[in-house]
Image: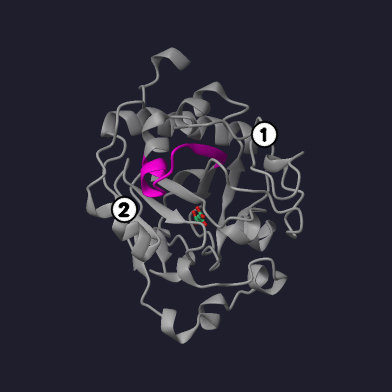
Amino acid sequence: MSQDLPDLSTPYHLPANLVEDFHQNGVVYLPGVLSADEVKVYCAVIDKVVHERTKHDTRTLVEKSPYEQALTQCGHLWSEFADAERFTRSLRLGEIARELFQADKIRLWHDQALYKQPGGRGTDPHIDMAYWPMLDRIAGTIWVALEPVTLTMGSMQFIPGSHRIDWDIDDFTIREDTHLLEAIPAEFRRKPIAFDLEPGDATFHHGMTIHYTGPNHSDNVRKGMTVIYFPDGVRYNAQSPMADHHCAAGTPHGEPIRTEKNPIIA
Ligand SMILES: O=C(O)CCC(=O)C(=O)O
């Protein structure tokens, strides 16, 4: 099927002010990254691989862990499913990351489908970088809506500018703190911003930006597909509590993360 998939190598034209917006707010809204036709095809692809990964899990929502009640999370799809790889390694998405970070080259950290079931819990406020063993705090995520996503379905909410807070992200309490919003220093407290997304729309957020969602109050699955990138040269932190992350396996402390799991995307 792979060769019949839409080719996502044509560029997305990033408006000139978006790089500055990203720098200021740590998040940007990207309408129409995939066309209606493209997203229809890739929604079917991702649905299929999520089904493959989850089909033996017969638990109801209430039988799942609190985390699983918030998200059906299927990661590292690209290395297992050729069709998902076409999405994850696409030049169009990678170029967006490269331009926003003003990087010479951008590498893959990993992908993940993030589905929120009807009635699913909200995603707790968190900082992604606290889960990634990187010495340089420069990485970010494109979150692509595969179907319409609204606030009442659990679209993401971001604290603009929070990527500039100088947390000690290796501090375990930051990673586990469900009261993260209250811990924000006064000078960084801002109202959250959120976007209703049509299929094919996306957001891109910095790995230090605080974000979260409300529950999915709708009868539909909230479907997002994400890809996480970092600029080539970002170094591995063997002293991080997340040091055993398999996407950096074998990298010596302080060296650039360049394993086979991190191909150059753009
Ligand atoms: O999809 C969600 O609810 C959360 C996503 C998220 O936290 C992320 O992409 O970093």
Point out residue 266 in the picture as x, y percentages from the top left corner: 44, 32
Location of mark 2 (residue):
19
- Residue 19 vs residue 78, the one in the foreground: 19
Q: Is residue 40 above or below residue 155?
A: above
In the image, taking residue 1 as reference, residue 137 lies left or right, namely right
Colour setup of the view: one colour
Callout 1, which amino acid? Thr
Point out residue 12 in the picture as x, y percentages from the top left corner: 28, 36
Point out residue 218 in the picture as x, y percentages from the top left corner: 40, 57
Residue 134 visible in image: yes
Tell me where residue 156 sits by quadrant: bottom left
Q: Is residue 146 above or below residue 214?
A: above
Identify the residue shown where x is 51% and y is 77%.
181
Residue 222 visible in image: no
Identify the residue shown where x is 69% and y is 74%.
173
> Spatial distance from mark 1 to mark 2, Cα to Cα?
28 Å
State which region is magenta: 96-111
In the image, taking residue 256 as reference, residue 230 lies left or right, namely left
Q: Is residue 140 above or below residue 184?
A: above
Q: Which mark is residue 259?
A: 1
Callout 1 crowding tier (Cα within 10 Å): few <14, some 14–19, many ≥20: some
In the image, taking residue 35 as reference, residue 85 lies left or right, namely right
Instruction: Indicate yes or no whether the magenta region holds residue 83.
Output: no
